[in-house]
């Protein structure tokens, strides 16, 4: 039986660990930190992952190792120990999570593991993953970028990925690897190529998504200025199949880990190779500005004075259906609103632990229900909605307070039926 060892703790690594553990394989996740219950709790906002995690741990298939300097070499880790592929170790490194020192120490150990398969995941400047693969003596080295995370659940995404790209150090070797075959069995699409080509494909895909989102949000600003409804325009544009319809939706910008990290490392790759990239610079600038756009609308609505205003905020997550907060607009908006004297309350049933880890002392009070005493607030700011039930239009109407919909989560019909002030992004309202 394969022994799968993963290095570095994040949503992607824990989802992969749980996936293989529930396939019946022995999995060890090297956390480089104390895997206490409170630490693992921040991943439990992903309900499918939570259930599978408990199952894998209860079955004894999944173990956590909290050593900050793990010694991964076993008695079988010599150059002749890997002839038995059914019982070999598989090493999977998540480069985003490891410090330079941790990565260097692990790299030195991996050089001594013999001809065992090594998988690499993460976002490094384009070309660096290829260099890392070449620096290892093993020929069974593969790069698997997590570009298939499309749903709010990372665990569901890894169980049914829409696209898996595998970079091979040696062409034609990945198909025979059990660990990779399992990942591909439910994939809609998959492909093999050299590591550098897969890196460049990752950069192309993620940078294209970020670029389209930033362009969409700039067009939405124009729609606001013209008094037009960008939702209507985007509905018409989506009829043309040459353009991906998934990213013609205006909002507060993009967040998460993958897109911001990709733009950052891609800009580094351009700089390292002395190539100017005014487009990527603009994409990042637009996204940063977009997160403050809803604040500017609120600031103008209240005649530039937010002092003492009680604001209810819905949603902390960076995308619909998720309470994960990396790159969320809330991280910028909450301190900005507080600095202008606003008093904030936040409704998100799953994000408190992660928010506490990020802020320490929270700049808002947490509420357990979205509608209780909503009429007592001066405004409702909608950033996201990660609950398992829809927003209730009638409850918002009864509250009778202005609504600032930064994620355009209320559809046009619902918004038009509100009897008080409403503004979204690119919906023609001026304030």
Image (tube, rainbow, N blue to C red):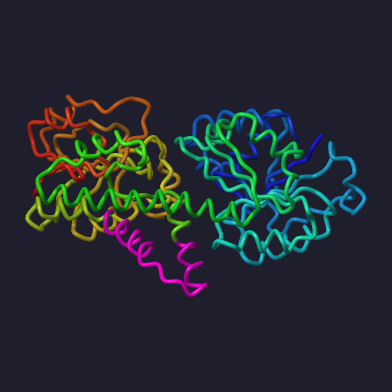
At horizontal 74% and vertical 52% (from top left) the residue drawn is 170
Quadrant in which residue 403 is drawn: top left
Residue 120 lies in magenta, yes or no?
Answer: no
Q: Name the one closer to the observer, 364 or 216.
A: 216
**SS majority, magenta:** helix
Q: Does residue 255 appear to the left or right of 343 in the view shown?
A: right
Q: Residue 27 at x, y = what percent? A: 72, 39
Q: Look at the picture and state if 125 lies above or below 32.
A: below
Q: Look at the picture and state if 287 lies above or below 408.
A: below
Q: Look at the picture and state if 271 lies above or below 71.
A: below
Q: How many marks?
A: 0
Q: Does residue 100 appear to the left or right of 106 in the view shown?
A: left
At horizontal 31% and vertical 53% (from top left) the residue drawn is 214
Residue placed furthest toward the right: 80
Q: Residue 229 at x, y = what percent? A: 15, 40
At horizontal 32% and vertical 42% (from top left) the residue drawn is 366
Q: Residue 124 at x, y = what percent? A: 56, 60
Residue placed furthest toward the bottom: 274
Residue range (magenta): 264-290
Q: Does residue 184 appear to the left or right of 367 in the view shown?
A: right
Q: Residue 426 at x, y = what percent? A: 19, 45
Q: Name the one closer to the observer, 290 or 169.
A: 169
Residue 285 lies in magenta, yes or no?
Answer: yes
- In which quadrant of the rendered image does the N terminus lie? top right
At horizontal 31% and vertical 36% (from top left) the residue drawn is 240
């Amino acid at each position: 039986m394969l022994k799968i060892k993963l290095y570095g703790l994040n949503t992607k690594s824990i989802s992969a660990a749980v996936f293989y553990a529930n396939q019946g394989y022995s999995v060890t996740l090297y956390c480089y930190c104390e895997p206490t219950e409170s630490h693992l709790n921040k991943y439990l906002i992903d309900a499918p992952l939570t259930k599978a995690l408990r199952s894998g741990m209860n079955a004894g298939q999944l173990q956590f190792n909290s050593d900050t300097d793990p010694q991964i070499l076993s008695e079988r880790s010599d150059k002749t120990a890997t002839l038995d592929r059914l019982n070999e170790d598989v090493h999977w490194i998540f480069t985003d999570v490891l410090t330079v020192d941790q990565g260097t120490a692990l790299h030195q150990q991996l050089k001594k593991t013999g001809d065992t398969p090594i998988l690499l995941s993460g976002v490094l400047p384009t070309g660096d993953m290829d260099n890392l693969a070449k620096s290892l003596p093993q020929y069974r080295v593969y790069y698997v970028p997590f570009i298939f995370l499309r749903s709010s659940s990372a665990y569901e995404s890894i169980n049914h990925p829409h696209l898996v790209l595998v970079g091979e150090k040696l062409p034609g070797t990945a198909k025979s690897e059990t660990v990779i075959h399992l990942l591909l069995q439910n994939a809609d699409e998959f492909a093999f190529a050299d590591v550098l080509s897969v890196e460049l494909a990752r950069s192309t895909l993620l940078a294209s998504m970020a670029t389209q989102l930033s362009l969409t949000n700039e067009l939405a600003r124009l729609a606001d200025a013209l008094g037009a409804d960008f939702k209507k325009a985007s509905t018409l544009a989506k009829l043309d199949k040459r353009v991906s319809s998934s990213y013609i939706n205006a909002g507060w910008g993009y967040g998460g880990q993958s897109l911001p990290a990709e733009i950052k490392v891609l800009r580094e790759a351009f700089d390292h190779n002395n190539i100017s990239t005014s487009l990527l610079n603009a994409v990042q600038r637009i996204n940063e500005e977009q997160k403050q756009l809803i604040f500017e609308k609120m600031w103008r609505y209240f005649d530039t004075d937010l002092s003492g205003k009680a604001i209810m905020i819905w949603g902390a997550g960076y995308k619909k259906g998720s309470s994960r907060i990396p790159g969320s607009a809330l991280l910028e908006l909450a301190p900005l609103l507080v600095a202008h004297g606003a008093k904030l309350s936040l409704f998100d049933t799953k994000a408190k632990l992660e928010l506490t880890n990020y802020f320490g002392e929270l700049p808002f009070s947490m509420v357990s229900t979205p509608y209780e005493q909503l009429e007592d607030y001066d405004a409702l700011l909608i950033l996201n909605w990660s609950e398992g039930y829809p927003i209730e239009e009638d409850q918002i109407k009864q509250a009778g307070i202005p609504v600032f919909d930064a994620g355009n989560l209320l559809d046009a019909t619902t918004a038009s039926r509100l009897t008080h002030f409403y503004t979204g992004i690119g919906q023609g309202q001026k304030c």
